Amino acid sequence: MEPTIERIVSRDVAIPLKEPFKTALRTVTTAETVLVAIYLSNGEVGYGEAAPTPVITGDSKASIHYIIDDLIGPKLIGMSLSNSEAIKQLIDTAAVHNSSPKAALNIAINDLLAKQYQAPLSEVLGGFRQQVVTDYTVSVGTSTEMISHAKRLISQSFHTLKVKVGSDSEQHDLQKVRELREAVGPEIKIRLDANQGWHPKQAVTAIQAMEAEKLAVELVEQPVAASDFEGMAYVTQRVNTPILADESIFFRCGCRSPHSYGWV
Ligand SMILES: [Mg+2]
């Protein structure tokens, strides 16, 4: 008999960080997260996670628990894992927005599928790559603090650094990137994330100046407000550096995106 979903449990977890994580919108000293466990009738359990980041996703601990425990969870009880696409559709369509709890449940279902197939989840999802390159975010701070953090990260073998900008004037941001590039040398990749902190003209001024100075910025993430698509287009058309949408994605596909935004 196909295993069915028997029980769904969510609980809060708080993990202290080694050092504060600072962006233009927030400073985080503890990784607060909601873990979800989906138990099957055969004893198997799948785990997922939702990060409560109200200033980014609008999802709070309370709303995450409500969506998992009261709204979607009860509807999943008794469903068979062999109908995993139906389960995922139910999760996606049970509420608009609320992407974090929906992602947590989706992740837990994927975890169960990987366990059922006795394969790593990367293979269940297509298995194209065995390795991916990731970046590490240099916390917002004074130039000295940022350079020392960057050097620490490089000594730990991170070769792509993400730098948060958009927290002050574009001149200040430019100076920050200039000093960092000088400190880390030409080999290290530097990508920027303004987390919506700039106005479109500010973004263009800053990015064009970085290009003129050959600071070799790999890409700039979310330079302007998430809902400002015209501003995103304005910036993209006026610079050569690739522009990446992050928070804007909520406005395009917030109803279906199975993506948790804990560490954007
Ligand atoms: Mg981002």
Image: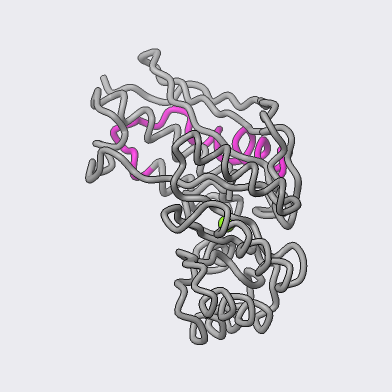
Q: Quadrant of the N terminus?
A: top left
Residue 131 vertical position relative to residue 236 in the rendered view, above or below: above
Residue 75 vertical position relative to residue 55 in the rendered view, above or below: above
Q: Where residue 246 sits in the image (x, y, percent)? A: 54, 61
Q: Main secondary structure of the magenta part?
A: helix
Residue at 54 percent across and 49 percent down: it is 94
The residue range painted magenta reads: 60-86
Residue at 71 percent across and 49 percent down: it is 144
Q: Where residue 11 sits in the image (x, y, percent)? A: 64, 25
Residue 41 vertical position relative to residue 254 in the rendered view, above or below: above
Q: Nearer the viewer, residue 130 or 167?
A: 167
Going by the image, does 199 lie left or right of 188? Answer: right
Residue at 68 percent across and 46 percent down: it is 53
Going by the image, does 23 lie left or right of 256? Answer: right
Q: Is residue 56 visible?
A: yes
Q: Where residue 255 sits in the image (x, y, percent)? A: 52, 59
Which quadrant of the structure image shows residue 124? top left
Residue 45 vertical position relative to residue 91 in the rendered view, above or below: above
Going by the image, does 235 lie left or right of 5? Answer: right
- Indicate whether residue 147 is drawn in magenta: no
Q: Is residue 96 visible?
A: no
Q: Nearer the viewer, residue 220 or 215?
A: 215
Q: Where residue 256 sits in the image (x, y, percent)? A: 47, 56
Q: Nearer the viewer, residue 106 or 244?
A: 244
Looking at the rendered structure, the number of numbered marks drawn on it comes to 0
- Indicate whether residue 78 is drawn in magenta: yes
